[in-house]
Image: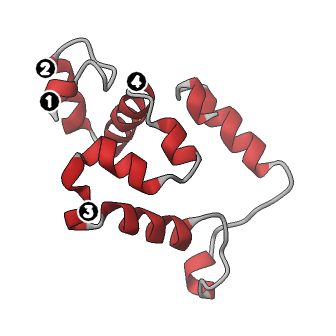
Amino acid sequence: MGFNYALAGFNSLQEFITAMYKGEREHLLAFVNYIINTSLHDELREKRWADFARKYNGPDYKKNNYDVKMAEAYKKFSGSTRGLTASKTRGVKKTAGSEKTAKKTAGKSMPHYFQ
């Protein structure tokens, strides 16, 4: 929300709005800044979905099952390609050092918490 522009890492509401029009990268960076600046990163790291959802979405988070949806999404997308068909993994190659190279490349333009 716009009133959280400073917590999302912006100096002004207009700077926030302009960034949100640029693309997904800016949305992700704003979200990560907000999570860090509101100290919600521990809840995510510790997979305390209900605590995160309550603090992020408010006390009515249960009405939309945000904590349940987060837990299901985490289970679905976390760290494994098991269960994916060959067509979904085509082009995804893990080679020795590829993750280190990706982090090094990303680190040049990304904040330290993405490294």
Tell me which amino acid carries mark 2: Gln
Q: Residue at x 35, y 30 (%)?
A: 34
Q: Nearer the viewer, mark 4 or mark 3?
A: 3
Q: Nearer the viewer, mark 1 or mark 2?
A: 1
- N-term mark: 1 or 4: 1
Q: CA distance from mark 3 to mark 1?
A: 24 Å
- Any mark on residue 14, and which? 2
Q: Are marks 4 and 2 in contact (CB under 8 Å)?
A: no
Q: Nearer the viewer, residue 101 or 112?
A: 112
Q: Is residue 60 above or below residue 26?
A: below
Q: Is residue 72 above or below residue 48?
A: below
Label 1 sits on residue: 2
Label 2: which secondary element: helix
Q: Are marks 2 and 3 in contact (CB under 8 Å)?
A: no
Tell me which amino acid carries mark 4: Asn
What percent of the width, then of the height, locates residue 55?
A: 32, 41
Label 3 sits on residue: 62
